[in-house]
Amino acid sequence: MACNGSERGLTLIEVLVSLVIVSLVLTAAMVAIGQVVSTAGSMRDRMYANWIAQNQLAEFRLANELPETGRSSGEVVYAGVDWSWEATVSETGVENLLRIDVSVGYPDNADFVRTVTGFVGAPVIPGQANRAWSSNSRRRGATE
């Protein structure tokens, strides 16, 4: 049976070109999906590390005593993953106020995922304001 000019199929070259184009588009889509998954995992790890650091800062504050300056460290299992933390307590130049930098990462890895900074002051009697701050504000109010 003879084909007239209006009935034309795709040539082998046209099929191959279209397959190359489709494969390039699918490859680009897979790379983009992989980057999204990687970014989501990284964000999850930074969020967990932030929570662990905040928990360590809360423990320093709840101890109800000024920590000693220097370094301390520990390990914790959080969300089914082993984490290590390192806290550096340093002077701030303000009496009875210390700076605490808590860095969190994976054990056996020198790089930290997240570092959070907090401050802790001298303990006070529960239910009372810090006398150093309230006496300073009263003095300022009296001189203004």
Image (cartoon, rainbow, N blue to C red):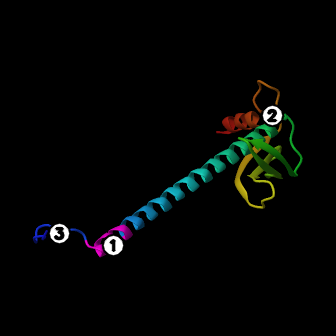
**Element type at marker 1?**
helix
**Which residue occupies the extreme bottom position in the image?**
13
Q: How much space separates mark 3 and mark 1, taking CA atoms?
A: 17 Å
State the separation of the CA atoms marked 1 and 2.
Answer: 68 Å
Name the residue carrying label 3. Answer: 8
Residue 132 location (% of width, % of height): 78, 37
In the shown orientation, is residue 97 left or right of residue 137? right
Q: Quadrant of residue 11?
A: bottom left
In the foreground, 60 or 32: 32
Q: Which residues are magenta?
A: 11-20
Of 56 and 143, which appears nearest the observer? 56
Q: Residue sitting at 37 percent across and 64 percent down?
A: 22
**Which residue, given by chain and number where applicable, does mark 1 sit on?**
17
- Give how far apart the Cα atoms at labels 2 and 3 are: 81 Å
Residue of label 2: 62
Q: What's the amino acid at mark 2?
A: Leu
Tag 3: amino acid: Arg
> Which image quarter holds the C terminus?
top right
